Amino acid sequence: MLYSKKVMEHFKNPQNHGKIEDADGIGKVGNPTCGDVMYIYIKVKDKIIEDVKFETFGCVAAIATSSMGTELIKGKTVDEALSLTNKAVAEALEGLPPAKMHCSLLVEQGVKSAIEDYLKKNAF
Ligand code: FES
């Protein structure tokens, strides 16, 4: 299977890897078919995603998309981050093999789930 140079860069040197202990929102998503799991942690201030980290127990594409997806939402508003799509993440990575497109769904769902958690905790 051929991955783009960008995918391999992010897989070998993932950005935002780790955990935020006092996160404002945590998302946990999994792919039932392969069993891969992803956690997304966000720190939000004045509706801006100030910090974001991920822990992904999964394949090359899942790790590279976690890295790129978190890069794309860092510094963005909560609303902007909610509109992140797996397609945008795959494009930023110069494409994914078709059989691996589903892996990029995890980061889209993980970001949404972390933001939903944040919104639930901060509902007035
Ligand atoms: Fe499980 Fe890629 S094979 S997310």
Image (tube, rainbow, N blue to C red):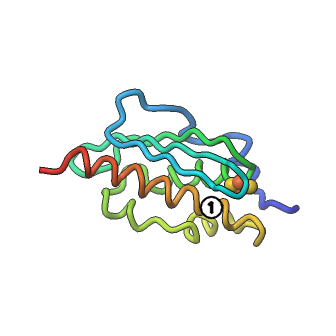
Q: Residue at x 65, y 55 (%)?
A: 32
Label tally: 1
Q: Amino acid at mark 1?
A: Ser
Compared with residue 58, is residue 97 higher up or lower down, i.e. above or below? Answer: below
State which quadrant residue 93 falls in: bottom right
Q: Is residue 51 left or right of residue 19?
A: left
**Residue situated furthest top in the rendering:** 21
Q: Position of residue 57 (x, y in %)?
A: 66, 41
Left or right of 22? Residue 63 is right
Residue closest to the eye, 124 or 21: 124
Give the class, few, some or many, for how many residues have Cα within 10 Å of label 1's Cα (few <14, many ≥20).
Answer: many
Left of 83 or right of it: where is 87? right
For the question of whether residue 87 can be seen, the reply is: yes
Query: Ligand 1 is found in which quarter of the picture?
Result: bottom right
Q: Position of residue 92 (x, y in %)?
A: 60, 64
**Residue 37 at what x, y percent from top left?**
61, 46
Query: Which type of secondary structure does the marked residue at label 1 adopt?
Result: helix
Q: Is residue 6 visible?
A: no
Q: In this picture, is 33 found above or below 9?
A: below
What residue is pinned by disc 1?
104
